[in-house]
Image (cartoon, rainbow, N blue to C red):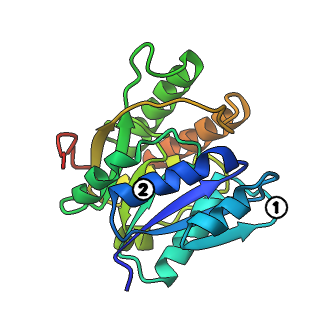
Amino acid sequence: MVREACVIPARDAAGTLRNVVSGLRLAVSGIAVIVVDDGSMDGTRAVGLNTADELVHLPIGRGKGAALRAGIVRAREIGAKRVITVDADGQHDPAYAPALLNALDRADIAIGARSRSEGSMPPHRRIANALSSRLASLAAGVRVPDSQSGFRAFRMGALDVIEVRGEGYAYESAVLVEAMRRGLRVAWIPVPTIYGPASHFRPFVDGSRVGWTLVKCAASALVGPRGRAADMAGITT
């Protein structure tokens, strides 16, 4: 029985994926690594086959949300009780994975919250993150420090009650809002902001989709019940 699994959605990430996987194995002993190849055109699939415990191959790129869902399904199939998600481009420091997993002792979901201070995040990403986090806060009814962070840990039981569809980047924001509105406990863990290779995130196209998703969530919150969130940003390993 697998206790913990890591889902890594990957698209054209052959140059960074190997280091991400090795970093996770150093940080979390015995973790099952699941790489989801989202229609990559480079050597991502080959790297995944050589480094991961499980490879899920999506022949056609379907977006980050679809890749995450596919990986979580596989984690559930192998019996994982806790799941951590990490981007394949090296923008998450695997050394912080234990802090997120340990936070699940007192929370249902733990999210790595990045600083938006000047110099730590590119200006266009800082503005987009601030706006999306503000919209997510309105939709959830509580403060959301970082709605777009893909560095997350979940109890499998929490994932079982979250009903969210979507295939792109908006999926992550919708999951967060749905979790909070269902009253799941969310811990915010400070993590460093790392930017290296160009992201697949398209500021206008993907940013607009994220914003529209959050606007719809905020509108529905006006007529539906809101959940609560535990502010546990001080949790460390």
Q: Residue at x 30, y 52 (%)?
A: 100
Residue 34 sits above or below residue 110 on the image: below
- In the image, what residue type sits under mark 1? Ile
Is 74 placed left or right of 43 in the picture? Answer: left
Measuring from the top left, give residue 231's x and y in whole percent: 21, 43
Position of residue 26 in the picture relative to residue 57 (left or right): left
Q: Position of residue 210 (x, y in %)?
A: 60, 40
Q: Position of residue 214 (x, y in %)?
A: 54, 41
Q: Which numbered disc flags the more N-terminal residue, 1 or 2? A: 2
Residue at disc 2, secondary structure: helix
Give the total of numbered labels: 2
The residue lying at 79 percent from left, 51 percent from top is 42
Residue at the spot of label 1 = 60
Name the residue at 43% across, 44% down.
222
**Do residues under tags 1 and 2 come within 8 Å of each other at their CB atoms?**
no
Judging depth in this view, the residue of 100 and 128 nearest the camera is 100
Viewer-closest of 28 and 218: 28
What is the crowding at mark 2: few (fewer than 14 residues within 10 Å), some, or many (at least 20)?
A: many
- State the residue position of label 2: 24
